[in-house]
Image (cartoon, grey):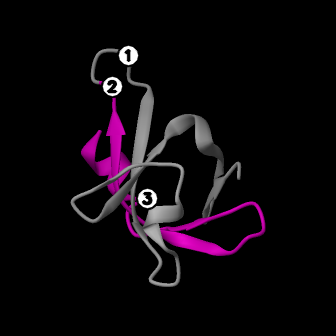
Amino acid sequence: MASFSSEFLKRPVVDTNGELFGLLEEIIIDTKSGQLVELLVDVSKEIDPSKLPWPMEDGLCRVPAQEVSRIADRIHLSR
């Protein structure tokens, strides 16, 4: 699983307008189900983390998997 998920690390994460939200730092997967749980994102310096709807931990934003609309060359959020 690590080799698969490492292909996505450092990919840009963008909002619905295509604007940069940050870069993907880590993928959290439920080891029992294999389901994506959340993304840990290094938020762009232009964004105020205190205004985000998701929690910050150790300098990374914990974005729930439900907020991902699609994954391609960039990771697209649903808002």
Question: Does dot 2 land on a helix, a strand or a loop?
Answer: loop
Residue 73's place in the image compared with 30, above or below, is below
Q: What residue is disc 1 on?
A: 33
What span is colored magenta in the figure?
1-30
Question: Does dot 3 land on a helix, a strand or a loop?
Answer: loop
Q: What residue is disc 2 on?
A: 30
Taking the spot 78% from the left edge, 68% from the top edge, the residue there is 17
**Disc 3 and disc 2: Cα gap in Å?**
17 Å
**Disc 1 and disc 2: Cα gap in Å?**
6 Å
Q: Which tag is nearer the camera, tag 3 or tag 2?
A: 2
Location of residue 59 (image quadrant): bottom left
In the displayed structure image, the side of residue 5 where residue 44 appears, left or right? right
Crowdedness near tag 1: few (<14), some (14–19) or many (≥20) residues, C-alpha within 10 Å: few
Residue 3 place in picture, x, y as percent: 29, 50
Taking the spot 67% from the left edge, 63% from the top edge, the residue there is 15
Q: What residue is disc 3 on?
A: 8
Label 1 close to label 2 by CB (< 8 Å): yes
In the displayed structure image, the side of residue 28 where residue 65 appears, left or right? right
Label 3 close to label 2 by CB (< 8 Å): no
* Residue type for callout 1: Ser
Crowdedness near tag 3: few (<14), some (14–19) or many (≥20) residues, C-alpha within 10 Å: some
* Residue type for callout 3: Phe
